[in-house]
Image: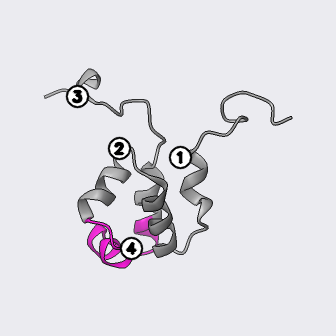
Amino acid sequence: MPHNATNDETSGSGPDYSALRAMRETRGYSVEQLSLTCGLAAGEIEDIENGKATDPSKLRRIASALRLPQEAFLASAVPTPAAQGRSLT
């Protein structure tokens, strides 16, 4: 069955966390292991990796578990003026 973007509330509206899966795998974590390490449900991690919206506290927990800077995911979660095409000055 083809994906129907009109039924997906987050289609095109959220940040892209697809790199999270690659970072997790590079560090040797399965979804289940990361779940135990950061205290989130495996389904929550899978949702984030699949581009569904999440709150910054979950991203901080994942970044900490993967030993990444806290801003690793937050920078893409919160649009900056420069990311929105506006000058920082």
User: Helix, strand or loop at disc 2?
Assistant: loop
Give the residue at mark 4.
38
Q: Amino acid at mark 4?
A: Cys
Q: Which residue is more in the foreground, 19 or 42? A: 42
In the structure shown, which secondary structural element does the residue marked by tag 4 occupy? helix
Foreground mark, 3 or 2, reads 2
Query: Residue at 57% across / 69% down in the picture?
Result: 68
Q: The residue under label 1 is which amino acid type?
A: Ala
Q: Which percent across, then down, holds residue 63?
A: 51, 67
Residue count near mark 3 (Cα–Cα under 10 Å), binned few <14, some 14–19, many ≥20: few
Report the span colored magenta.
24-41
> Which badge, 4 or 2, is on the more N-terminal residue?
4
Direction left: furthest residue:
1
Say the numbered circle drawn on residue 3. 3
- In the orientation shown, which residue stands out farthest toward the right? 89
Mark toward the start of the polypeptide (3 vs 1): 3
Asked if the residues shown at circle 3 and circle 1 are in contact, with their CB atoms under 8 angstroms apart, the answer is: no
